[in-house]
Image (spheres, grey):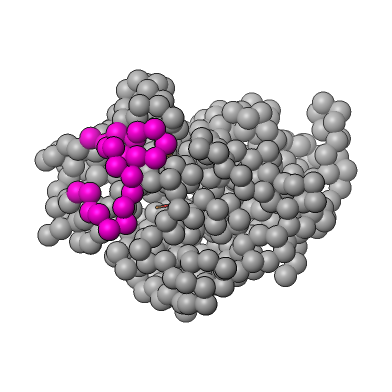
Amino acid sequence: MDNLKVSASKEAKGGGSTVARNLLYLPAEVKPTALSITAAPITVNLGGGNNAQVWAYNQSFPGPTIRANRGDNATITFQNQLPEHSIIHWHGLVVSTENDGQPQQAIQTGETYDYNFSINQRAAFNWYHPHPHMMTGEQVYNGLAGGFIVNDSEESAKNLPSGKYEVPLVIRDATFSKSGDMLYKPTSGGFFGQIALVNGTKDPYLDVDRAVYRFRILNGANSRVFGLALSNGASMHLIGNDGGLLPLSSDQARIDMGNGERTDVLIDFRNYPAGSKIMLRDLRAGWDILEFRVGNTEQKPFYATLPLTSAVEPLPAAVKTRTFSFDGMTKINGNLYDVNRIDWTVKKGDTELWVFKTNGNAPHPVHIHGASFQVVSRSGGRGKLFAWEAGWKDTVLLEDRETVTVRIRFDSFTGRYVMHCHKLEHEDMGMMANFEVVQ
Ligand code: C2O
Ligand code: CU
């Protein structure tokens, strides 16, 4: 299937270098009801006639964006047409164990898996991706990932930009061979690709009106951490993260995102003259990520009131503290992942403090299934919390020498879940653990 990423043009860039830029691909939106998702190998045009073999959900790279309302019942059938076993995890959605897509639930080639869960959580930008043990890195790298937006009435009342003014950006990296094939050659330190892809597009651009846009950003890279900023130094208005709208929105000149983390930002193009070009850049690698091309159309009215506020009640005081050490590149508290071992149990409804430490080889973006958490503190390393770490999170970035403490409460389901490093190569090598929520 043609992924509609064709229109390339030669454009002069600031420094005089030229790069052919390609129209940003926007995956189709689908509803979570009676949805069938097939994973299979396909050939896609990454833009400018760059064809590559990828693995895709429903022939779209990245997969279709699922859009749900709070209260919806999701009925999704996963069909595995990959040459190896797989399973889909709904990252950021709190669902029962059998709907969570954990490694032990992986299905073989040709098999199907039925999900049936109700969506009972705040509006947020979540995502979905494979989770088979030791193969998640390869499968996500090959192209299996998609956005999963949940809307609710609290958020709709805020009058945020929608329709063509709301754009999901799945940012990742990749390396290509001379013949244009995507290469996956991870080292023990992770996988670091040579270029960025946004929504599967190479060197993308997006035509924007002179209007305020809402960008739902996912760091969908296997290992790479991004430090996002605009080329003209303008701020982005940060309104949300993994768990939805922040208690208080704010202007940010730079936003750092670990693997699996999401941010929700407004960018105001109303005051740029038509013809302006602004680049979304990654300051860590010094990469151009996405070029915004400002057009003539004006859409001045903007109805949301800034800064935006959204009540987030703090979790109560913790009744227990647990410490987890992310050791080397493969272990948590000295253990490699064992799919059959439950590493600890948590009482449903109890608030706990979980303290994450590392003895090196970070960054380790720590992700927990089964509940969102609130980040309490960071000491060592960067030594503070960032605006995008307020509110509710499901993934938090642990850099070298850092200790990060979160407050968490599992109040939805009993059953088993996993915690792991979302640097996918670390996860695949064993930096993952099972725990069980008990009554
Ligand atoms: Cu995004 Cu357990 O994963
Ligand atoms: Cu790690």
Q: Is residue 96 above or below residue 290?
A: below
Seen at 39% across and 32% down, the residue is 328
Ligand 2 position by quadrant: top left
Across and down, in percent, residue 439 comes to 12, 60
Q: Which residues are magenta?
A: 323-344
Q: Give the left or right position of residue 15, taking residue 343 as reference.
A: right
Where on the picture, by quarter, is residue 380?
A: top left
Say whether residue 379 is magenta.
no
Residue 279 appears anywhere in the view: yes
Q: Main secondary structure of the magenta part?
A: loop
Name above or below for residue 225 compared with residue 401. Answer: below
At which x and y percent is residue 246?
39, 42
Residue 291 or 277: which is nearer the viewer?
Answer: 291
Give the quadrant of the N terminus.
bottom right
Which residue does the image show at 42% across and 56% down from the upper left? 133
Q: Residue at position x 63%, y 30% from top?
A: 285
Q: Is residue 63 placed above or below 286 in the rendered structure?
A: below
Residue 100 image position (x, y, % from top left): 36, 63
> How far across and down, in percent of the image, does residue 409 sit?
22, 48
Question: How many numbered marks are there?
Answer: 0
Image point 23% across, 54% down: which residue? 342
- Left or right side of 18 for 345: left
Q: Is residue 257 left or right of residue 175?
A: left
Q: Is residue 341 magenta?
A: yes
Q: Can you see residue 299?
A: no
Left or right: 347 with respect to 169? left
248 and 412: which is toward the camera: 412
